[in-house]
Image (cartoon, rainbow, N blue to C red):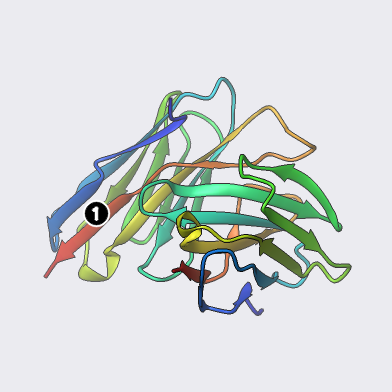
Amino acid sequence: KAGVTQTPRYLIKTRGQQVTLSCSPISGHRSVSWYQQTPGQGLQFLFEYFSETQRNKGNFPGRFSGRQFSNSRSEMNVSTLELGDSALYLCASSYGGRPGELFFGEGSRLTVL
Amino acid sequence: EDQVTQSPEALRLQEGESSSLNCSYTVSGLRGLFWYRQDPGKGPEFLFTLYSAGEEKEKERLKATLTKKESFLHITAPKPEDSATYLCAVQEARASGGSYIPTFGRGTSLIVHP
């Protein structure tokens, strides 16, 4: 069974630009969550999608947005990038019956210059 | 105040030297506690779920235990390949938006020297 796939793995952007990250969950997993990981803050929850609906949102500014498609694939977008947005962005999928057991992708490493 | 606190932040062990990692939590009601392993440059890998005090789970050299206020990850006779960051996450019994979002601790970085 294929794992969670995230693209791109690495990207470099400059301040003010915007970025879109993609996530393909494990087949059969309908919940997709996004996390930001930095050395200073650890893993911070961004948002969760289930059946194309955002069910939960973390404490991040509106520059961070996401969506989920009918095939459960998800994208997140960050607009007007700031230096502090440099981080590892992780996508995780889960099976509906076990919401806390997350299966993570390898992440997208974003560097903002 | 952090809901999930892991200690120590970093731990260095010699191969074969057993030890324990701690995860303490302050949520009012626990739905589940989860342990993950994260290797450098990779996403966390799910290890265990614990639901109630007294529960234990084992996998190879790892054993996770749970009390009403904390969980321990015991590592018996570790090997260098056990070197990783171990993350603990807690899920409150109170749902938000119809789901239960786990809160992660900052992790313990474990290095096992040969």
- Lateral position of residue B81 relative to residue B63, left or right: left
Secondary structure type for disc 1: loop
Left or right, B87 with reference to A102: left
Taking the spot 61% from the left edge, 74% from the top edge, the residue there is: A6
Residue farthest along the right direction in this orientation? A70
Q: Amino acid at mark 1?
A: Thr
Residue B31 spot, x, y in % from top left? 61, 33
Residue B33 vertical position relative to residue B39 in the rendered view, above or below: above
> Would you call the spot at circle 1 few (<14 residues within 10 Å), some (14-19), or many (20 or more)?
some
The residue closer to the viewer here, A65 or B5, is A65
Label tally: 1
Q: Quadrant of the N terminus of chain B?
A: top left
Give the chain of mark 1: B
Residue B5, how many percent across, how many down?
37, 34
Q: Quadrant of residue B54?
A: top left
Q: Is residue B30 above or below residue A79?
A: above
User: Could you tell me if residue B44 is visible in this image?
Assistant: no
Q: Whole-percent x and y of residue B60? A: 36, 61
Instruction: Judge from the rendering whether residue B74 lies leftward or rightward of residue B34; answer left or right.
Output: left
**Can you tell which quarter of the image residue A23 is in?**
bottom right
Quarter holding the C terminus of chain B is bottom left
Q: Is residue B2 left or right of residue A95?
A: left
User: Height in image: B16 above or below B31?
Assistant: below
Residue for point 62% across, 49% down: A46
Q: Nearer the viewer, residue A18 or A56?
A: A18
Q: Residue at x 85, y 71 (%)?
A: A71
Which residue has dot 1 on it?
B76
